[in-house]
Amino acid sequence: MILTRARILAEIDAGRVIIDPFDPAMVGPASIDLHLDDEIRLLEGGPAVIDVNDDADYLKVSRTAKMTGPYELAPGETIHGITRERITLPGNIAGWLEGRSRFARLGLMIHVTAGFVSPGIRNRQVLEISNLAGRPLAIHPGTRLCQIVLQRCEGSAIYQGRFAKQERP
């Protein structure tokens, strides 16, 4: 079941869901807006052809950069961003990262395929940002670029995988 504003605020008030930093104005009818931080990861370097197999590692074909102002995202380009907010979920709540329609209508995708947020996480969320528009899009740090939709799980689990402690894009 999807949590609505009243349930989200109750989970936050009880300390079961933690969003840091948090402002109640970020909570909508059934989601929480999240801000883009100022660090991005640019996909560049490496071989001309990247083998997509079990050994593929995005770190070998990318570098991080600070955004001191807007970043001009070229048509067809994909970068990684990260949320300003650290999200902590209990073992019985998972989430889904979603773009905001105001930006989707301009051709901006916020996550390519990895929108699921596992139960029991305690980290910042990496955003796989792509430009589907026919012109460059200037993305700005601090923008409420995406939202997380929270969903109660049947049972409980804690994510302990590769990205459990991610702090950088």
Image (cartoon, grey):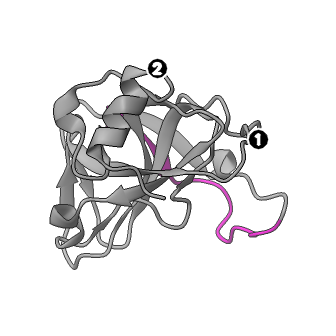
What is the residue that sits farthest to the right in this orientation? 54
C-alpha separation, residue under disc 1 versus residue under disc 2: 23 Å
Q: Sequence order check: which comes first, mark 1 or mark 2?
A: 2
Residue 127 in picture, x, y percent from top left? 44, 50
Q: Residue 15 carries which label?
A: 2
Q: For the point 29% across and 24% down, which residue is it?
A: 22
Q: Main secondary structure of the magenta part?
A: loop
**Is 107 on the left or on the right of 56, as rendered?**
left
Q: For the point 74% across and 42% down, which residue is it?
A: 157
> Which residues fall within the magenta stretch?
36-53
**Is 94 on the left or on the right of 20, as rendered?**
right
Which is in the foreground here, disc 1 or disc 2? 2
Asked whether the viewer can see residue 43, the reply is yes
Asked whether the viewer can see residue 85, the reply is no
Q: Is residue 125 magenta?
A: no
Closest to the observer: 60 or 81? Answer: 81
Q: Residue 161 carries which label?
A: 1
Residue 144 in picture, x, y percent from top left? 22, 43
Q: Does the magenta stretch include residue 41?
A: yes
Callout 2, which amino acid?
Gly
Q: Dot 1, how many residues are within 10 Å of its Cα: few (below 14), some (14-19), or many (20+)?
A: few
